[in-house]
Image: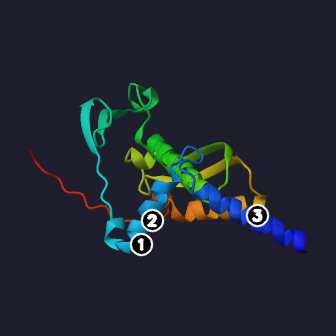
């Protein structure tokens, strides 16, 4: 019993020490801690605004501008009338969800002192094309999204399951998809 208590205590101390390292899993955990502390002290700092600008180029090809980063693009596959030069928006939505989850796993594992050895997320979803094409009434978006997370890390299965639930519960993209949110769209004639 004493040995078990001692091992648990050492593990807790090791995780605490690891969470104070400058980087863990390639993440600067001190920046995460500083941001968390700042938001706890000034909750208004947690209300953030994110922006994107999309500029039509030709056909179904669009340029996506975000902050001062290099532009990315969206297109449709040839079977849907595009030129297949970039992922389409629904593929990008899956990519955004997968990336958000990967960031969540990395951040949460890092502050807990869990070393990630491998992380891969596969996502797929079903869309009813006749609704998108205006041939039927119904929901034009994904009817469901299946997510498989392949995670190899230096933690017990129960700890990884707790990490998994925490990531799903706190994913901004996941929560946006899962919960119905209002879209406020305005047409500006130029």
Can you identify the residue that label 3 sits on? 10
Q: Which badge, 3 or 1, comes first in the chain's sequence?
A: 3
Q: Which numbered disc, 2 or 3, marks the residue closer to the eye?
A: 3
Q: CA distance from mark 1 to mark 2?
A: 6 Å
Q: Is residue 101 above or below residue 119?
A: below
Q: CA distance from mark 3 to mark 1?
A: 29 Å
> Is 27 positioned to the left or the right of 6 in the image?
left
Q: Residue at x 67, y 60 (%)?
A: 15
SS at badge 1: helix
Q: Residue at x 64, y 62 (%)?
A: 16
Q: Are marks 1 and 2 in contact (CB under 8 Å)?
A: yes
Q: Residue at x 50, y 58 (%)?
A: 174
Residue 161 visible in the picture: no
Residue 46 appears at what percent x and percent y? Answer: 36, 66
Q: Is residue 59 above or below residue 90?
A: above
| Quadrant where the N terminus is found in the figure | bottom right
Q: CA distance from mark 2 to mark 3?
A: 25 Å
Can you identify the residue that label 1 sits on? 40
> Is 22 positioned to the left or the right of 35 in the image?
right
Question: Residue 117 appears in which quarter of the rendering?
Answer: top right
Q: Nearer the viewer, residue 45 or 133?
A: 45
Residue 36 appears at what percent x and percent y? Answer: 45, 65
Q: Which badge, 2 or 3, comes first in the chain's sequence?
A: 3
Q: Is residue 67 above or below residue 17?
A: above
Can you identify the residue that label 2 sits on? 36
Q: Residue at x 76, y 68 (%)?
A: 9
């Amino acid at each position: 019993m004493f040995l078990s208590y001692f091992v648990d205590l050492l593990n807790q101390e090791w995780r605490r020490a690891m969470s104070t390292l400058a980087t863990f899993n390639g993440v600067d955990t001190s920046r995460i801690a500083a941001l968390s502390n700042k938001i706890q002290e000034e909750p208004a700092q947690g209300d953030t605004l994110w922006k994107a600008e999309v500029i039509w180029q030709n056909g179904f090809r669009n340029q996506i501008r975000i902050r001062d980063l290099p532009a990315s693009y969206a297109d449709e596959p040839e079977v849907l009338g595009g030129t297949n030069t970039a992922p389409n928006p629904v593929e990008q939505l899956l990519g955004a969800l997968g990336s958000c989850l990967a960031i969540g796993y990395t951040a949460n594992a890092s502050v807990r002192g869990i070393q990630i050895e491998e992380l891969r997320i596969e996502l797929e979803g079903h869309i009813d094309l006749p609704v998108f094409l205006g041939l039927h009434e119904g929901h034009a978006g994904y009817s469901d999204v299946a997510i498989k997370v392949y995670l190899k890390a230096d933690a017990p299965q129960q700890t990884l399951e707790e990490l998994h639930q925490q990531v799903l519960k706190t994913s901004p993209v996941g929560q946006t998809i899962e919960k119905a949110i209002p879209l406020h769209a305005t047409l500006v004639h130029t």
